[in-house]
Image (cartoon, rainbow, N blue to C red):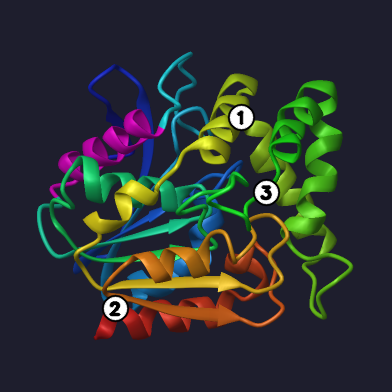
């Protein structure tokens, strides 16, 4: 099942590893499912069936003109789960932008087949700074993402990944080859999908979706995250999700799958084993 055809004709590239209780990994912007590989390998070796996929417009998936709003992206998730035969006892794990798909799936698809959820450095519940969301990111900064990409996309992501991985402000930043690898993943995406998804994660309010989390939920976030600030997202998500547990990684940046890879894997395995 390397590709799944969605209800609107998009081709979604899927990686399906191992056997056992299903765990669906949803990657962040502007990467692909490959960013999950260390965790996917460890979970599969531990006896889980791990399904990860490239969001439409990214990685090896097709690059349609439309479908980058969260309702459409979440319907893609539902299409992948249906094609994979995932009908019960699944865990959804969303990193960064991928947390939005988890939240919207819980509300839009009533959490069908899901028994637990994990939000890692997630944009849930709301990124934009407003009067009732004072810890969010100012609108001009979010709009600056699109401006920077349109002006010089390669240079924008060259700089973006430094903050993403904490280069210059954490004690164990990633290697230069890791930065280059992430940059290459970002450049695989279409310009259209990159811009439209940035708009979606920046301005979608997931606060109305939080009551739909009726399963045990683990929230993991770095306190030093400059890309997705913890006060507007991780802490607020944990406060708004009834059956949630918040685990803060002190001083850690956004790209936890790389900077805190072993700890993240262990926390996922511990949560899944409960």
Count residues near mark 1 (Cα–Cα under 10 Å), then give few for <14, some for 14-19, many for 20+. many
Identify the disc placed on residue 40: none
Q: What crowding class fits label 3: few (fewer than 14 Cα within 10 Å), some (14-19), or many (20 or more)?
A: some
Drawn side of residue 243 relative to residue 251, left or right: left
Tell me if 49 is positioned left or right of 127 in this view.
Answer: left
Tell me the distance, in whole angstroms, between the alpha carbons under discs 2 and 1.
Answer: 32 Å
Which residue is labeled 3 in the image?
137
Q: Using the image, determine if residue 241 lies above or below residue 52.
A: below
* Residue designated by label 2: 272
Q: Which mark is residue 194?
A: 1
| Mark 1 residue element | helix
Label located before the other in sequence (2 or 3): 3
Q: Residue at x 77, y 67 (%)?
A: 174
Tag 2–tag 3 contact (CB < 8 Å):
no
Task: Return the residue nearer the eye: 40 or 103.
Answer: 103
Span highlighted in magenta in the image: 70-85
Which residue is located at x 39 percent, y 34 percent?
Answer: 70
Task: Name the spot of residue 81 as percent of width and height, x first.
Answer: 21, 45
Q: Is residue 273 at all visible to an observer of this figure?
A: yes
User: Is residue 76 magenta-colored?
Assistant: yes
Label 3 SS: loop
Q: Residue furthest front?
A: 131
Q: Is residue 24 above or below residue 128?
A: below
Image point (64%, 62%), residue name: 255
Side of 260 where 99 appears, left or right: left
Looking at the rendered image, the disc whose residue lies closer to the viewer, 3 or 1, is 3
Asked where in the image residue 64 lies, by quadrant, the reply is top left
């Amino acid at each position: 099942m390397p590709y799944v055809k969605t209800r609107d004709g998009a081709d979604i590239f899927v990686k399906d590893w191992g056997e056992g209780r299903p765990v669906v990994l949803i990657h962040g912007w502007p990467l692909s499912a490959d960013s999950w590989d260390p965790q996917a390998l460890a979970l599969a070796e531990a006896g889980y069936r791990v399904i990860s996929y490239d969001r439409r417009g990214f990685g090896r998936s097709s690059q349609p003109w439309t479908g980058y709003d969260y309702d459409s992206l979440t319907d893609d998730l539902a299409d992948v789960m249906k094609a994979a035969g995932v009908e019960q006892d699944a865990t959804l794990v969303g990193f960064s932008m991928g947390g939005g798909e988890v939240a919207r799936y819980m509300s839009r698809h009533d959490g069908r087949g899901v028994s637990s959820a994990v939000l890692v450095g997630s944009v849930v519940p709301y990124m934009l700074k407003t009067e009732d969301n004072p810890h969010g990111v100012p609108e001009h900064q979010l709009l600056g993402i699109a401006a920077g990409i349109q002006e010089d996309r390669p240079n924008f992501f060259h700089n973006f990944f430094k903050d993403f991985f904490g280069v210059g402000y954490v004690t164990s930043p990633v290697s230069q080859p890791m930065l280059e690898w992430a940059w290459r993943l970002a450049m695989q995406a279409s310009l259209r999908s990159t811009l439209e998804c940035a708009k979606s994660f920046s301005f979608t309010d997931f606060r109305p979706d939080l009551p739909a989390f009726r399963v045990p939920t683990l929230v993991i976030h770095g306190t030093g995250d400059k890309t997705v600030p913890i006060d507007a997202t991780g802490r607020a998500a944990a406060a708004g999700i009834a059956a949630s547990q918040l685990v803060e990684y002190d001083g850690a940046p956004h790209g936890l799958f790389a900077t805190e890879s072993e700890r993240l894997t262990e926390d996922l395995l511990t949560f899944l084993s409960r």
